[in-house]
Image: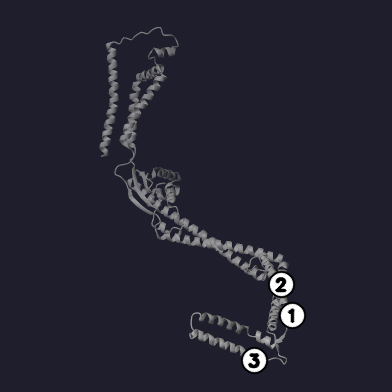
Amino acid sequence: MDELLNQLMGYVRATWHRRWYIVIVAWIVSIAGWFWVYTLPSRFEASARVYVDTQTLLKPLLGGLTVQPDIDQQVRLMTRTLVSRPNLEKVARMTDMDIKAKTPQQTEAMLDGLASQIKMEASATGNNLYTIAYQNEHPELAKRVVQALLTIFVESSLGKSRKDLSSSRKFIDEQLKVYEQKLIDTENAMKDFKRKHMGLMPGEGGDYYAKLSATTTSLHQAELDLREATDRRNQLKSQLADEEPEISAAAVQTQSNPELDARIQALQKNLDTLRLTYTDLHPDIVSTKRLIKELEAQKKQEAKTIKSSGDGRALNPVYQQLTVAIAEADATVASLKARVDEYQSRLGQLKKAVDSTLDVEAEYTQLTRDYGMYKENYASMLARSETASLSGEVESKTDVVDFRVIDPPRVPLKPSWPNRPLLISLVPLVGILAGIVVAFLVSQLRRTVTDRRVLRELTGLPLLGSVTRIETDAVKFKKRKGLIAYALSFFSLIGAYGILLTLQMFMAR
C-alpha cells in the first residue's frame, strides 16, 4: 500500500512540474469550447398533449352485437410507429420541409433529422395521456410539425380499425357468396337424387337396418296375433259343436230374457234398501214398485209372443251367438293372414334390396351431411356479416375512440436547447482535465528524477547518499514569481468563466 501511495505521489509531483501545460491547455480548450457554445443554434421545442379515451358508453351496450377491437393495443402500436418512414414523409409534405430537399441524399438527411428530434412519450401513470414533442431552430416550423404529428396520430388510429373492418366485411361477403352457391348446388343435387331413387330413400323411421328390424318385429307380432285369433276361432267352433240349433219353448222362455231378469233383480234390491228407511207410501218406493210391475208384465208379454215351430221348439240363442262370433273370428283370421303376407313381402323386398338400399342411404347421408355443414357455415357467415355491418355503422357514425387535446401545440419563448450556462460551466472543467492529462503524458514522455526512489528505479544501482540543494533568495523569489503568475493565469480563467456565465444569465432574461 505504501509503495502504491509513493508511486502515486511521484506521478503527482511529475505532473506538478509540468503544471503550465495544465493552464495552457485549459485556456485553449475553454476558449474553443466557449466559442463552440455560442455558435450552437438555439432549438425550440414544440409540444402537445392528447388524451385517448377508449372507455366509451357504447362499448358495454353493444357487447356481443358488434366486433369490439382492441383499441388500446391499436393506440399503443400507433405510438410506436408514429415515426415510421411513411409518416415522416407525410409530415414533411404537410410542413413543406420536403421543398428544401433537392436530392435523395438531402431527403434522407432531412428525414433522419426529423426522426431524431421527434419524441412520443406516454404518461408514467398509464392513463392514455401522450405527449408529442419536436425540436427545431424555427419555432413556427416546430409547431407545425407537432400539429401534423397530432393529426396523423388521430387519423391513423381511427382509420386503422375502419380499414380492418372494411377488409373483414369484404372477405366475409365473398365467403358468404361461396357458401350460398354451395348450398344451391347441394340442394339441386339432393333434389335430383331423390327423384332418381324414389322408393329407396330412407324414411322417417330410420335407416335400412332400423326398417328391417321394425318390419321383422311387426311380422312376428302379426304371426302371434294370427295364432291367437286361430285358436280363439277353433275354441268357438268346439263350443258350437256342443250346442243344439233348436231348443224347447220352455227353455227359450227361461233363457230369452236374461237382461229383464237382471233389471228386475236390481230393482228388488233397491226396493229392499228403501224400505229400511222409508214407508211404502214414499214416492221412491211407489215408483220402484211400479217399474218392477212393468218389467214383469213385459217379460210375460215376451213369453206369450214366442211361437213354437209345430212341435213346441225354437232357435237356440246361444247357438246363434256362437255362429256370429265364429264369423267375426274368421274375418279376424283372414285380416291377420293378409297382414302377415304383407310383412313377409316387405321383409323379402328389404332383403333383396340390401345392397342398393345401403348405397342409396350412404350417398344420401353424405349429401345431407354436406348440406348441413354448408347450411351451418352459411348461417354463421350471415350472422358475422350482420355483426361486421353493425360494427361498420358504429365506426362510421359514432366515436369509438375519443381524442381530447389537453394542450394544443405551443412553443415556449425560451429555447429548450442548448443549455448554455451548463455548457459554459462544463467547458473549463473539461479544459482543466485535458490539461492534467497532457501534463501527465508529457511527464511520462520526458521523465525527470523527482526523488531517490525514482533514481533507484531508473539506474538499478544502490543509492549511497544524496546532496541537498540550498536555494538562494534570488531562486526563492523567482519561484514565488512563477507561482504567482501560475495562480493569476488560473484565476483569470475562473474569472473569464464567471464573466461569461453572468453575461449569459443576463441575456437569458
Q: Amino acid at mark 1?
A: Ala
When the figure is inspected, residue 216 is found, relative to residue 498, above or below; the finding is below
Disc 1: CA contacts within 10 A as few (<14), some (14-19) or many (>=20): few
Residue 458 image position (x, y, % from top left):
43, 13
Closest to the camera, between mark 3 and mark 1, is 3
Q: Earlier in the sequence, mark 3 or mark 1?
A: 1
Residue 321: image location, x then y, percent:
68, 82
Neighbour class for label 3 at 10 Å: few (<14), some, many (≥20)?
few
Q: Nearer the viewer, residue 485 or 244?
A: 244
Is 415 rendered above or below residue 254? above
- Tag count: 3
Say which residue appears at 54% left-offset and 86% top-offset: 289
For the residue labelled by badge 3, is the local secondary structure a helix, a strand or a loop? helix
Instruction: Give the SS element for disc 1.
Output: helix
> CB of mark 1 within 8 Å of CB of mark 2?
no
The residue that mark 2 highlights is 227
| Real-space Cα separation, disc 3 to disc 1, in angstroms | 29 Å
Secondary structure at numbered mark 2:
helix
Q: Quadrant of residue 230?
A: bottom right
Q: Observer-nearest residue: 429 or 395?
A: 395
Query: Does any portion of residue 170 appear in the rendered image?
Result: yes
Q: Which residue is mark 3?
A: 305
Q: CA distance from mark 1 to mark 2?
A: 21 Å
Question: Residue sitting at 36 percent across and 27 percent down?
Answer: 433
Which of the two labelled residues, at mark 2 and mark 3, occupies the earlier sequence position?
2
Name the disc covering residue 241, or none.
1
